[in-house]
Amino acid sequence: MNYLENYEFWCSANLPAEVKQELAKIKNDDEELKGSFGSDLQFGTAGMRGIMGVGSNRLNNYTVRRAAQGMAAWLAATDLPQKAAIGYDSRHNSKEFAQVCAVAFAEKGIKAWLYDRLAPTPMLSYAVRELGCGCGIVISASHNAGAYNGVKCYGPDGCQMTDEPAAVVTEKISQIPYFVPEIKSFDAYLAEGMICYIGQNIWDKYYDTVLAESISPKTIQNAGLNIVYTPLCGTGNEPVREILGRLGVNITVVACQEKPDGDFKTCEYPNPETDAALAESYKVADGVPCDVILGTDPDADRVAIAVPDGKGGYQKLSGNELGCLLLDYILKARSAKNDIPEGAIVVRSIVSSPLADRIAEHYGVTMRAVLTGFKYIGGEILDLEQQGEENKFIFGFEESCGYLKGTYARDKDAVVASMLVCELAAALKLEGKTILDALWDLYDTYGYYLAKVQSVELTGADAMEKAAKMMADLRANAPKAIGGADVTAIRDYGCSEAKDLLTDKISVINLPKSNVLEFILGEKGSVIVRPSGTEPKVKFYYTAVGATKNSAQELLETMVYQMSK
């Protein structure tokens, strides 16, 4: 069907009056019709994400139900436990979509465990494992603007669904017609026990598990640490404050971003990677004692910080900088206790800072670099777990502000990361140092590794085709030098080949194939290019290495300028 035929199909269906009204409103808006009905919202390894509204290419009760039915059909055909865990965040319709998913599972004879209130994404990952479920779903669009929502899907290990089962779910979804009525209501399944709420006992177990990952819990009380915290109107408010409160952190919450708000009125784009996300926090921090500003995104799987710069303002740290600081703190503390197991590993995504490799090497720990997506870090933990060696996992992080210490969850967790940030800050405060002092110490020790992420936004119905062409052009016309530094090697993850341009030697990349290109500039840095997995954009990840900050900064700026032409 074309978009107009698809629209007429929806109009002819027996839908509630309010849905009919939405359909009528866009009848004469051709662009909206194309956007809403030009295709079906795509299901991938991360589930699906999109703008909420009416139509097959929007997130609504019908597209969510169809996705959940596909998940249920997949699970029912496996030998996995016939149980599913479901969580949801503070966005509009999240609770309703979660209930729609619960009904879809119950209809298939699969018991659905639904969180009894807003819960962070990592708590869903934890619940899948703790309750012994075959899969999980969390309703969230992470850090996207308020118009968006999403369905994130998880496997039995609590890790985001991998390619193989996701492909099966996609096939199952394609066989399910739209508008299949519910057999029974949510309340009916709840009454008969096919749907159950995840109660306070799981919250308390999660809290105890996170606290067990603390390295030096008394440090915080001894330091009298003061933080300003914003949950960015999301799910972090309860668990982050609970954990930090138990450890004695003095917390000032940004009042205008404390309560759930699906419109995110005080922060249009609630992504802690951006400086704008902490704008309200800066205002609050000006009037209270503050050692650290801490912000978690709406589903509390990412955390970012800013610290006083000593000049009356604040410096926001990048995800790479915070990841390296936390890694150094953890390894230094465990090394002092002679507590690093033989064969210990740290995991980072390939687009995260190689400064972490130098830190890991210093402490005699192996670094593993994996594809972008925390599921690949979770996969490394699963491999260790299957060998009975999960204790060898020390820390995992992504440059996009995602961190995990511990194996209790298989997704990034802003709650445990917030605790570690406070421990780090407290330990430094007791030494008479700041987080910025610690960062400069890292750079002085290992060299200045400066990084920048550049997103090239693509528009139009052919946005994905434009992204593919951009990648094809780079493969066909690879630069010989970037920013004045020679390209010494090219790693093409799409064909799993790495070519050393100095020797012409070709080696195999032992990672799943992915549409990613990496241009290595010897010891001076790299440029990695990949299309986004969830949005119409191509991302460029720059790393510039220098003996001084100025030399690294100059190289970084030249690299970005050349690749932007």
Image (cartoon, rainbow, N blue to C red):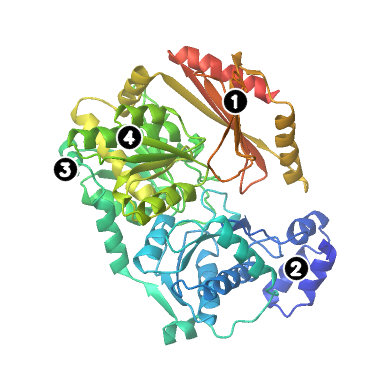
Question: What residue is pinned by disc 4?
Answer: 365
Nearer the observer, disc 1 or disc 2?
1
Q: Which three-letter amino acid code belongs to the residue tagged 4?
A: Val
Return the disc, 4 or 3, that comes first in the chain's sequence.
3
| Residue 218 image label | 3
Task: Name the residue: 25% across, 25% down.
Answer: 433
Provide residue 366's location: percent of width, then percent of height.
36, 35
Tag 3 and tag 2, C-beta contact below 8 Å: no
Mark 1–mark 2 distance (CA, rounded to whole Å): 59 Å
Element at badge 1? loop
Question: What residue is pinned by disc 1?
Answer: 505
Task: Name the residue: 52% across, 48% down.
Answer: 143
Q: Is residue 229 left or right of residue 141?
A: left
Nearer the observer, disc 4 or disc 3?
4
Mark 2–mark 4 distance (CA, rounded to whole Å): 58 Å
Tag 3 and tag 1, C-beta contact below 8 Å: no
Return the disc, 1 or 4, that comes first in the chain's sequence.
4
Q: Which three-letter amino acid code belongs to the residue tagged 1?
A: Lys
Q: Which three-letter amino acid code belongs to the residue tagged 3?
A: Lys
Q: Residues within 10 Å of mark 2 (few under 14, many from 20)?
A: some
Return the disc, 2 or 4, that comes first in the chain's sequence.
2
Element at badge 3? helix
Mark 3–mark 2 distance (CA, rounded to whole Å): 58 Å
Nearer the observer, disc 3 or disc 2?
3
Rendering quarter of residue 494: top right
Q: Quadrant of the C terminus?
A: top right
**Viewer-closest of 255 and 469:** 469
Element at badge 4? loop
